[in-house]
Image (cartoon, rainbow, N blue to C red):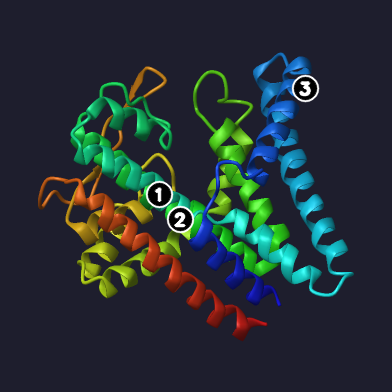
Amino acid sequence: MNILSIYIGYIVDLIIGDPYSFPHPVRFIGKLIKITENKIRKVAKTDRLLKIGGFFLWFITVGVTYFITYIIVKLSSLIPGGFLISNSFLIYTTLATKCLKDEAVKIYDVLKTKDIKKARLQVSYIVGRDTAHLNESEIIRATVETVAENTVDGIIAPMFYAFIGGAPLAMAYKAINTLDSTVGYKNDKYKDLGFASAKIDDIANFIPARISSILMATASLILKYNYKNALKISIRDRKNHKSPNCAYPEGAVAGALGIQLGGTNIYFGKEVYKPTIGDKYRDIEVNDIVKTNKIMYITSIISIIAFTIIFKNLY
């Protein structure tokens, strides 16, 4: 029943994605993070106390998310078909295949009109870097990097945890990931409070990020991109990122398309140097956004099939 739920959730995500009017669980997770953060900051006045408070923030957010999801699934299972409906729906909310594609296409469509100012604004909705002065190539690179990285965060990882522990564990992962994107920054405000969230997110993505190399290389083979180079760059440049995980999917895309990702970006007004990922066989171009979306979609299909085979044999 859990595997069937995952397939239903995945198909629903492909069809309707994340409607803007929909009260997405991540919004509630975000509100819980903000409320808890404010409470902690009222009592934690030193760096050490903020770092300790960060662990409490993590335990409260992830614990409450898992517990509420578990209760919903458990109670709904008391009525016929309730488990399948609730588990499927909650798993659907943890996936972001269509949403990622749609956001990337919006940027692609604006870039085709040559409206750089609008493209900068559009890309600012999906990246953490400053976008005010990005040129066309940098906007394309930011989009490709985000789709590649979020193929793990928004598809492979939540699907992986859904197969292990159903909706409660998939939703707990979503809380971990939301914590990292909310407080897991290394700036003055969050370097202590967000320490636990950033580190545990790295741990949660450790396995999904590494298997993304194989999954995305396989997708590249199906799409007739350079699958050998996808696997090669993913492994060779795996350490060329401040995150221990992000270079794997970014390297796979860079290798498959023969482009170079990474490099210097501006975050919160500060220049942050990042090593490059991939070899620059050619300049990055707007159609690379479409190609990256294709890799993401095929990877999602391969992932659900691969996880089904693996976990059916394990259980």
What residue sits 60% from the left and 65% below the top?
A: 9
Query: Tag 1: residue type?
Result: Asp
Up the image or down, 242 lies above or below 53; here it is below
Badge 2: residue crowd in 10 Å (few <14, some 14–19, many ≥20):
many
* Image quadrant occupied by the N terminus: bottom right
Q: Nearer the viewer, residue 138 or 114?
A: 114
Q: Mark 3 sits on what residue? A: 39
Question: Could you tell whether 250 is left or right of 13 in the image?
Answer: left
Viewer-closest of 98 and 228: 98
How far across and how far down the image is residue 76, in percent? 84, 64
Residue at the bottom extreme, as displayed = 313
Tell me which amino acid carries mark 2.
Answer: Lys
Q: Which mark is residue 204?
A: none
Residue that carries the numbered disc 1 in the rendered image: 102
What residue does disc 2 label? 98
Residues under numbered marks 3 and 2 in contact, where contact means CB atoms less than 8 Å apart = no
Amino acid found under the numbered disc labelled 3: Lys
Q: Position of residue 135 (x, y in %)?
A: 20, 29
